[in-house]
Image: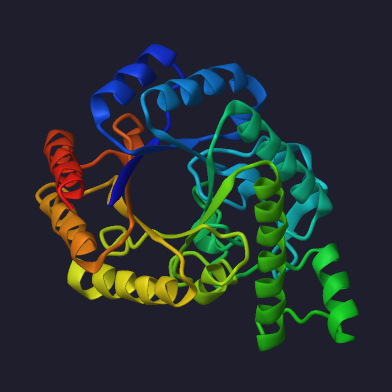
Amino acid sequence: MKVGMSCFGCRKITHIERELRAAGWDYLVFTYTETDLLFYQGLMRRAFALARDLGLGVWADPWGAAGVFSGETASWFVSYNPGAWQVRDDGVPVPHACPNAPETREFMHRWIDAVAAAGAEWVLWDEPHFWSPGADYWPGVGGGGRWACRCRRCREAFFRRYGEEMPAELTPRVEEFRRDSMVSFLRDLIGYAAERGLKNAVCWVLPELLPSGIALEEVAEMPGVDVVAVGPYWLAADRTREGFFVPYVRKALAECRRHGKPLQVWLQGFRVPRGREGELLEAARDLVKFGAEYLAIWHHNGMSSLLPGDPAALERVIAGIVDVARRS
């Protein structure tokens, strides 16, 4: 089993170097934000080269890009392209780019060009999703029960396909249209990334946590997907490892085996409640037993909104997870 860690938040090369040399990972997943695209391209090239020199695999994550991929960061593209915004079922625009907008795809192609030129080997397409009430970080936005996207482009495309106006209800046809829209968007990005020499992983999330419009089996069978990733964060979902994580991973593994794809499983290394750190170690042992090919930990020890209850205890558990993976 290969074990990896997220690398984000710090853009000081000496600090990044200390973290990389002390880690003992097989690969690093670097968040490559729109701010990196605008202001840190040179530094990111150096960070990627340093990781490769240390024998680490280099993955790039479009963290928060266009508001379509997950990440606690704002999108410059969305700010300057209001015409590409998604629109809720009640007609309210929301600052997340529509995957059917050609500007969105063009922008993501530029992002792919940048990470390929920087020396990335993989792209992790991190939890692609439509806007939903759970996708907003800004306090007080609301919109419970609402969905997207019902922008002009989506309504016109829906009419061309079905010969009827797009309803304001989430009907089976609307769900089919959203699913096909996201599949088309991902296939375009995956194909373009492959042309630029990059391998592709797609991190799927349960619709009850964040609606992507696509099913796990659609990710697994998608051409060009080299690794299927899942983030079964039972702590964030207020569930248990046995009742949530284990069946989630087993389902994902079965789907991956059916399509001949490796599975990457992310463990929650953020907002871990004090006293529950050991559950992550048990989850790592589950992954060894089940035969998952990739383990990764989404962890950051600087962003206050993501801090665990006991950072020192969590660091000790993470070291234990690396040891478990190494011995598998």
Task: Tell me where residue 320 sits by quadrant.
Answer: top left
Residue 9 vs 81, above or below: the answer is above
| Residue situated in front as seen by the camera: 287 or 172 | 287
Task: Tell me where residue 222 sits by quadrant.
Answer: bottom right
The answer to whether one can see residue 88 in this image is: yes
Q: Position of residue 154 (x, y in %)?
A: 80, 68
Model colouring: rainbow
Q: How many marks?
A: 0
Q: Position of residue 125 (x, y in %)?
A: 55, 52
The residue depicted at 33 percent of the width and 35 percent of the height is 300
| Residue situated in front as seen by the camera: 131 or 291 | 291
| Residue situated in front as seen by the camera: 326 or 319 | 326
Residue 221 vs 321, above or below: the answer is below
The residue depicted at 67 percent of the width and 40 percent of the height is 112
The residue depicted at 58 percent of the width and 38 percent of the height is 74
Q: Position of residue 64 (x, y in %)?
A: 56, 44
Task: Tell me where residue 173 sits by quadrant.
Answer: bottom right
The answer to whether one can see residue 97 in this image is: no
Q: Position of residue 145 (x, y in %)?
A: 55, 73
Q: Is residue 145 left or right of residue 1?
A: right
The residue depicted at 24 percent of the width and 24 percent of the height is 22
Which residue, as the protein is rendered here, is positioned at the far top? 14
Q: Is residue 285 left or right of residue 264?
A: left
Q: Is residue 150 left or right of residue 66?
A: right
